[in-house]
Image (spheres, grey):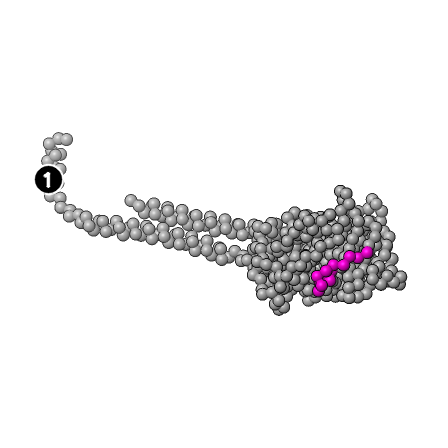
Amino acid sequence: MNADLREELDRLGDTAPVVDVDAAAVWQRGRRARRREAGLAVAAAAAAVALVAGLVAWLPTDDGALEPAGSREGLGVPAEVHLPDSPRRDVEPAPDLAVGTTAAVLVTSDTATAVAVDATSGGYRRLALPGLVDGNLAQTDTVRLSPDGTRLVYTYADGAEDGLGLVDLLTGELRQVPLPGSGDGVLVRTISPSPNGDWFVWSAQRREGSGFRGEVAGLVDWAAGTSDQLVTWGERQRAFGVGDDGTVWYDDAGARLVPMFTRSLEAFRPLPDDHRWAYDVHVGGPGFQDVAQVRAWSIDEAAPVAPALLRGTGDTRDIDLPDGAMPYVVGWVGDDPVLVPTGDTADTTSAVVRVAPAGSLTQALSLIGAAPYRVTIATDLLADGAVERPTPSWADYGTSWWRWAIGGGAAVLLLLGAGVVVRRRRP
């Protein structure tokens, strides 16, 4: 640096104004700036929390609240009955068996789990049925509702005893009735209620060697809580039905329908010989004209098996269900048998149908879900048609997780945005 430049800088320094810095004021301004930054971060976090809370409120709520047992108002069967993929994960357990009037009961084949659908709220609850037996749902009835939905009969086995459990769904009372041959192995094939729910007739096979062969059947008197054995013969599978007066009818593997207590020759009705087998017979009234069953049949051995509905009058009609499943008779609505497809189908939606005397099919409700289920329905509650009920939250599982993901992503973006704003405002 030469002498001239040094002199010029000294002159400028001597003539420059003196700056008086207020250190306290500078400190206060810095504190206010930090407060603003913190406020922005808090506001962003609050907005994220509010967004997530709003999404939680938007999610479907659990509609499974049960009405007090015994309430008779607003009863009905939901127009859509959902089959949970995992009932033990998705469906809350009922505190006891007093769940009130029940629209339907769903039973899984793999876990022997029963789910009750409430007739008032449409809510779903798992039933703790001691010893509930699982099995091939296409060939066995393990649970059956009375037509009015207040009583339930199920098969149980605890290793030492095989029997039927009688459950009063209004009071929660459970009575257990041992079956003939109990302990040696009894496979219940069918359970059929009378229209008034005072009687339940069942058919079964006893274990013989490595399989089930010998036929056995019985009649449950609900009031007495007992089961009387019925006389049967042969080893061919049969199906049974019972009327309001306790009269039992049976199907002799495609040969005849016989009133077991009267045994009048005039009561015999020949059935078509080309029908191979049947699972269910239900009596909707005191006369033969109210007997119905579903048979699988084919014209010859090479033809595909197709279902047909057989009435006690001898009228047989082919059934063409939308999903092509083999149906079974679940009960009656007036003069119309109600058919439910077997649960082991690939379709995610199947139809429960009413069959008019002329043979026309009317969809009564839908079963939604592909899980293997056996379904029993309180058919008296379908007299005025199915009713609308809220969709359970677990039936919207995929959508719910997407909503959580979207909400969580939005919250993260807001927090990141707040962080960027804060960093940019820092010196």
- The percent position of residue 322, horizontal first and vertical second, equals 72, 54
The residue positioned 68% from the left and 49% from the top of the image is: 160
Left or right of residue 400, residue 131 in this image:
right
Is 221 contained in the magenta span?
Answer: yes
Left or right of residue 408, residue 294 in this image:
right
Residue 117 higher or lower than 111, as above or below: below
In the image, 349 versus 132, the foreground residue is 132
Answer whether residue 325 is visible to the viewer in this image: no
Residue 400 higher or lower than 78, as above or below: above
User: How many circles with numbers are drawn on the protein?
Assistant: 1
Q: Secondary structure at mark 1?
A: helix
Looking at the image, which residue sits at the far right? 265
- Numbered range of the magenta stretch: 220-231
The residue positioned 86% from the left and 59% from the top of the image is: 269
Give the position of the N terminus as an image quadrant: top left
The residue positioned 61% from the left and 67% from the top of the image is: 71
Residue beneath disc 1: 11
Left or right of residue 285, residue 272 in this image:
right
The residue positioned 17% from the left and 47% from the top of the image is: 21
Give the position of the C terminus as an image quadrant: top left
- The percent position of residue 360, horizontal first and vertical second, equals 77, 60
Q: Amino acid at mark 1?
A: Arg
Left or right of residue 33, residue 255 in this image:
right
